[in-house]
Image (cartoon, coloured by chain):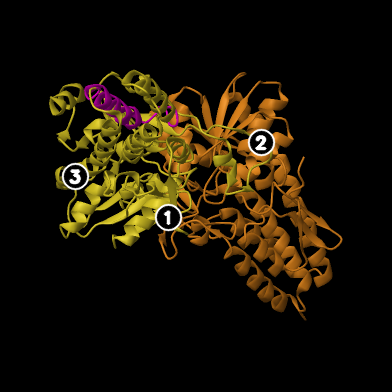
Chain colours: A yellow, B orange
Amino acid sequence: MVKTIEWNAHGVRLIDQTILPQQKIFVECKTYKDMAEAISRMQIRGAPAIGIAGAFGVALGARQIQAGDFDDFYRQLDVVCRELNATRPTAVNLSWATDKMRKIALDNKHLPLQQLKDLLEAKAKEVLAEDIAANRRMGAYGCQFIKDGDTILTHCNAGALATGGYGTALGVIRVAHEEGKKIQVYADETRPFMQGTRLTAWELMEDGIPVTLNTDSMAGYLMSLGKINLVIVGADRIAGNGDTANKIGTYSVAILAKEHGIPFYVAAPLSTIDFKIRSGQQIEIEARSEKEVTHVGNTLLAPAGVKVFNPAFDVTPNKYITAIITDKGVAKPPYVENLAKLRD
Amino acid sequence: MVKTIEWNAHGVRLIDQTILPQQKIFVECKTYKDMAEAISRMQIRGAPAIGIAGAFGVALGARQIQAGDFDDFYRQLDVVCRELNATRPTAVNLSWATDKMRKIALDNKHLPLQQLKDLLEAKAKEVLAEDIAANRRMGAYGCQFIKDGDTILTHCNAGALATGGYGTALGVIRVAHEEGKKIQVYADETRPFMQGTRLTAWELMEDGIPVTLNTDSMAGYLMSLGKINLVIVGADRIAGNGDTANKIGTYSVAILAKEHGIPFYVAAPLSTIDFKIRSGQQIEIEARSEKEVTHVGNTLLAPAGVKVFNPAFDVTPNKYITAIITDKGVAKPPYVENLAKLRD
């Protein structure tokens, strides 16, 4: 299995996902600013993975802090957390992870600072280990929806590379495959950043799971041909009512699935659910660089100076979602009640 | 206005659309095989434009023929027509144009061969002139559907570059703009061949019509934000019942428009309607090279050896189409009756 991110003797090592699949190159993050840059540049991406990266970033930042007492330490840690949160505003996992680390610091303010720094590092490693365990539980809950012989469409990369190393949507698919179900996957290429082409196709091929690549524009046609039995995607943030922010294009796929009577599943750890917000309309949508749309690599494809629309995510209203698969169980509509039940 | 294709002293000159918008380079076709290659490589593309290219190709082929009598000439002309038809199997305009040229030859078999060759050249030029006139008529019929202040989504390039020089879908938009309506266009980039990015954005910017580029995956989200008032696309082949084959992804856009209550128009000359076929299920869908999906230019983005699905077109069933705008008037449902009325 791919080691998306790990703590080593020098700091944190992560696979540079902007270079896959042509080269497998690692980025070494020695400081929290290195980590903030890696997240911002999408060298690591995927909601759960950037949650882990956020926790590791806080642990790295804690190591860098020179402070005389806890209050001074915490004031500096707060700057670290805020800077990390600002790198990708849509993913709730980042603030979930930095909040968790902040709370650990506050709960252990009595410790000598060096011991507190060690504790934060240990807790960040736990976030990673727990993510992998959670993905496996999610896969176990979700694989009931996959039958032998099914063909599954997915969008973006909600796989090992988007998580600590197993995957949310692809984790469900992996469990079905491990159970011996003969399944196939169609991967939306996922413009503009091509996570489907570069990451999903690559990691499924590494695992020997049959995968076919298609442009995002082909999803409807594939469904009309009867080639798709179900859709599974991940999530970047889910509102308390089940409305789901995920990679741009997910909303279109959900509508296409509904029109063809195909079930549409979201797989995400419970930490992706932001119970503080009641609907998807409250989710801030990150706008990214125009260059992602106009260029491939450094090659300009569009006319110079063209205006561009490049939101990183869209929100799929709960009415299009057949079920939300979490690490604590499966929620079906009505989501306000049933997601709260999983939490409590 | 762009000169997409023209006859000159050396043969036929056309803009190489695979290189736009970075460079404006022309291809000179001296033989029908040059033309077949230009069509096949999509240096010229768009259903009406390849109809014109087909007629010009037949005229070039006729010039090359060494024959003793009409029967010998016609036998060779038939080879030329078949070879041109085979370059892009979905577009009906190619066989429409080559059939038309064939019929002109048969109707004028009494002429000396040199005169017959001159006549075929003159008739091919008429096809071009008539296309431009037809697009202007179509624009006049279609612009009733565009109100001042509207924002229009289009897919692929159904513009000057897809036609003799004015456009079908973009022709309707051009007429609205010429009438002084303040309109804006969102252009789907149109993966995998990027006609929206490279061609639609470019030709609208050339004409000073406000255009914003978006990936195909953003169309649904744009609609959900209330940014789109109507959709207009072109067509590669329309069945007698109105089912419309157009660039891959059109079907998805049509479903998204329906879900958001947005009207969806097809603009195409009556020659695009293939009355010989009764429904879209009879339309052959061209499969194109995997490289269009896996590579950008010569750069491989996908993992080596990945399986790819790359149909060039899809079929939008008539139930998703608000109206079909032709050069002979506008047809609304029921299409079987109302398209036949336009023809007769």
Q: Please state the extent of the stretch shown in magenta in the rendering.
A: A85-109
Camera-nearest residue between A48 and B200:
A48
Q: Which residue is drawn at 71% across and 55% down?
A: B16
Residue type, numbered disc 3 = Ala
Residue type, numbered disc 1 = Gln
Q: Mark 2 points at which residue?
A: B171
Residue A91 percent across, percent down from the top left:
36, 31
Q: Name the residue under label 3.
A: A133
Q: Mark 1 lies on which chain?
A: B
The local secondary structure at tag 2 comes to: helix
Q: In this view, does B137 lie to the left or right of A45?
A: right
Residue type, numbered disc 2 = Gly
Can residue A265 be seen at all in this image of the molecule?
A: no
Q: Name the residue under label 1.
A: B282
Residue B336 percent across, percent down from the top left:
45, 41
Depicted A113 relative to depicted A224: above or below: above
Residue B115 percent across, percent down from the top left:
83, 66
Can residue A250 be seen at all in this image of the molecule?
A: yes
Same subunit, labels 2 and 3: the answer reads: no
Q: Mark 2 lies on which chain?
A: B
